[in-house]
Image (cartoon, rainbow, N blue to C red):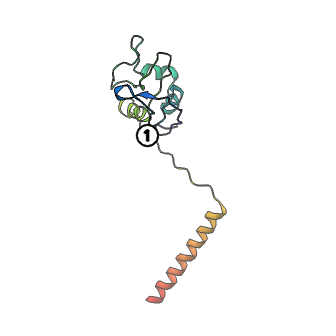
Amino acid sequence: MSVSDFSHSPLSEFPGPMGSAFPSPEPGLSIDDVQRALNRSRASVYRYTNTDPELLNPPYDATKLNPELRQHKDDPLVFRPQEVRRFAEEILGLQPVIQVQPAPETVTTDLLRQILEELKAIRHHLEQQQR
């Protein structure tokens, strides 16, 4: 799995400006999702995370993996995919991996390939006639 691959888990609402609540625009990643994305142990992910036993929501730390704000100390840690990507690239030095897999061969792709070859032959024939 690469840094750019994330399976999303649902998020609850986060506090907005002036105490209003608004739904998060993008689902967050659980510790397990981050562990798979970074290909690190669960203990390592917890070591990278910006947490403090005394503070529910510690201030932003650019050298750590910063979770979303929590309402209660028992809420699970949730991370934005952009934050995980930032941490992986800037702090861990990982580069995103894009995996391209060829499409499975089907009757349709075979038929389209034959049509393309026939069109190429027709074009070649027409170009020969114009000379």
Quadrant location, the C terminus? bottom left
Q: Residue furthest top?
A: 54
Q: How many marks?
A: 1
Q: Which residue matches tag 1? A: 96
Residue 93: x %, y % from top left = 38, 33
Looking at this view, is 43 or 68 the one in front? 68
Identify the residue shown where x is 62% and y is 55%. 104
Out of 9 and 104, give the one closest to the viewer.
9
Q: Is residue 81 above or below residue 71?
A: below
Residue 98 % position (x, y): 47, 45
Left or right of residue 63, residue 49 in this image: right
Q: Quadrant of residue 87?
A: top left
Residue count near mark 1 (Cα–Cα under 10 Å), binned few <14, some 14–19, many ≥20: some
Task: Please state which amino acid type lies under the numbered disc 1.
Answer: Pro
Identify the residue shown where x is 34% and y is 26%: 18
Residue 116 at what x, y percent from top left? Answer: 56, 71
13 left or right of 112 in image: left
Mark 1 secondary-structure assignment: loop
Up/down of 15 relative to 25, above or below: above
Residue sitting nearer the eye, 19 or 46: 19
Q: Position of residue 69 (x, y in %)?
A: 41, 24
